[in-house]
Image (cartoon, rainbow, N blue to C red):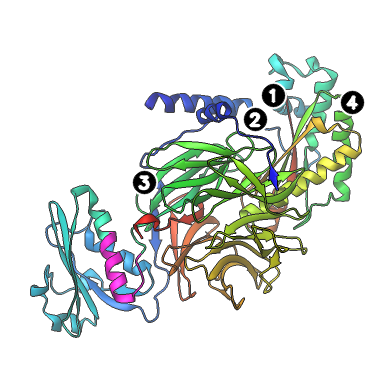
Amino acid sequence: MLSNFGALRPRAAAMMLATVSLLLAAVPGHAQLRLDITQGVRDAVPIAVVPFGGQAEGGASDVAAVVANDLRMSGRFAPLERRDMVARPTSGAEIRYEDWRLLKSDFIVVGRVEPDAVSFELHNVRTGASLLTQRLPSSEKGRRAAAHRIADLVFERLTGIAGAFSTRIAYVAVDGKPPAQRYRLLVADADGFGPRTVLESREPIMSPAWSPDGASLAYVSFEGKVSAVYVQTLASGERRRVSARAGINGAPAWSPDGRRLAVTLSRDGNLDIYTLELATQTLTRVTSDDAIDTEAEWSKDGQSLYFTSDRAGNAQVYRVALDQARKAERVTFTNGYNARPRISPDGKELALVTLDRGGYRIAVMDIASRNLRVITNARQDESPSFAPNGALLIYATRDGGRGSLAIASADGAFQQRLSADQGDVRDPAWQPFGPRG
Amino acid sequence: MKLMHVLAAAVLSLGLAACQKPTQTKPDESGGAVESGAASSSGLGGEAGAGAGAATATLTPQQQALADLQQKSVVYFDYDSSEIAQQYVPVVAAHATYLVKYPTARVRLEGHTDERGSREYNIGLGERRAQTVRRALLVQGVAEAQITTVSYGEERPAVEGADEAAYGQNRRVEFVYAQ
């Protein structure tokens, strides 16, 4: 079914640009996110990340501190506190393994910062074996990036899972009291550092979604006093209004090949899901039910969509093939409310919001067995998004009455808050790996 | 680039000034008739035109009717419901009467939800509430062209708070009149 209502008018789109601030500037400190370690993690592997030689300890570009923080954030490692370190080796030859055995560290990372590179080594404390030695080109400004890369490599060497610490997160920050609020779309490092404003508006911004190559964001902005879907390339700041049809324009989700967006549109108030070919603006209707159909997510093969619908009376997750050979089939049966499906990187699981014992919580469902495991335990958790390695999820929660972000392991073993100093933060989306594979 | 930002900010603030919302009244407040003239004249926006700040006595009958209406310009909803509760039927009827009497008047119905549940799904619930009110206006003779709807879901709460009192204030449809 082809539909062609409300074609995009480029001139109107250009005018719209003037009503909001489009920036890619660093944000003053108050938008900074801080990782709060709220619980010790059982079975976390003890590791010593020794302060690197060649740079002063402390400060934002302290390489070892960034590496240790990343590893702690993963929930799988328990980095040794610096105050407990009895020595500061900066190369494998300088490590006295008996010292670190006494401190009960299983592994040790040492390294040095040079003007144009950062080098590091990973050793097994028990055996003394060298597990990894690498020198990463790095300018003075790129120390944190190098540190995240080191964390990725250490994590992968010790767990067999690619690290996702070099990726970024997009989220929405809201300041001010209702009804006079200020909305910002931000992008920060995965550890919350260095948020940069992508868009700022007096009207709501919601539902950021990363393109599969990790270079662009689709999002919903109400800057024109009605909702519209935009696609913005982060490097250039260039953006396009891709859907501004009468009624609702919401819930954008990228096809795996990055050529199409699934979007939610409404005609006479009935929300249905469509796909939108970005290059041609071709719109194809996917659902046509009287119920609320929204929050589409693509299957990994790009052949079907998962979505939320209340066609059976309350919100549940359904799947429909894009060729529409069959009716949409319901895929969630546990609990009376399941919404906002997000597919895992391997395509085998769905993260979703479920109403569990009176609280809205994040659950991960195995698609084949339909087995649903609840992985968070607050009362108002929403907007789950998988890290590109599938090991962690970022989601939104409430903390002391304020919106906060949080990170949970996909197995539910731990949760950690990523909270803002002030204001609400919400609607997080974790950047995919992109082409670097 | 810098100039663009300044320009954008200027346009943004202009837009804000032009789009001020009508004063809201809580469902259980009767609203003092005396001070209402001043409070709602700013909310009249384009309808009042150049007469902003003018004395109550200069209001046209339509402006007076609108000022009266805006004492009750919000319909509140029960949890997970888009039905208009009995107590708000007269509210909707009063707006219908006004819109029928003044066919050039335009109303924007803004649907909202409380913060519980998924954001985009709540956009759907807010839209459903706005559509319920729209249909109620239509059956009372209001022309389709007079009504637009928008759903903000949980994105624009009326009040802060995570208790039932706040939720009740946030599950609503607002009648917003503009030029």
Q: Earlier in the sequence, mark 1 or mark 2?
A: 2
Find the magenta span and give its range. A148-163
* Magenta stretch: includes residue A206: no
Q: Nearer the viewer, mark 2 or mark 4?
A: 4
| Amino acid bearing label 1 | Gly
Nearer the observer, A412 or A299: A299
Q: Are marks 2 and 4 on the same chain?
A: yes
Q: Are marks 4 and 1 on the same chain?
A: yes
Q: Is residue B171 visible?
A: no
Q: Residues within 10 Å of mark 4 (few under 14, many from 20)?
A: few
Prevalent SS, magenta region: helix
For mark 3, name the chain: A
Q: Quadrant of residue A144?
A: bottom left
Q: Looking at the picture, how far across and down is residue B134, in whole percent? A: 81, 40
For mark 2, name the chain: B
Q: Residues within 10 Å of mark 1 (few under 14, many from 20)?
A: many
Residue for point 77% across, 32% down:
B107
Check disc 3 and report the residue beneath it.
A29
Q: Quadrant of residue B138?
A: top right
Check disc 4 and report the residue beneath it.
B101
Q: Earlier in the sequence, mark 4 or mark 1?
A: 1
Q: Earlier in the sequence, mark 2 or mark 4?
A: 2
At numbered mark 3, what does the secondary structure look like: helix, strand or loop? helix
Q: CA distance from mark 2 to mark 4?
A: 24 Å
Q: Are marks 1 and 2 in contact (CB under 8 Å)?
A: yes
Q: Looking at the picture, how far across and down is residue A400, in whole percent? A: 53, 59
At numbered mark 2, what does the secondary structure look like: helix, strand or loop? loop
The label on residue B20 is 2
Q: Residue furthest right?
A: B140
For mark 1, name the chain: B
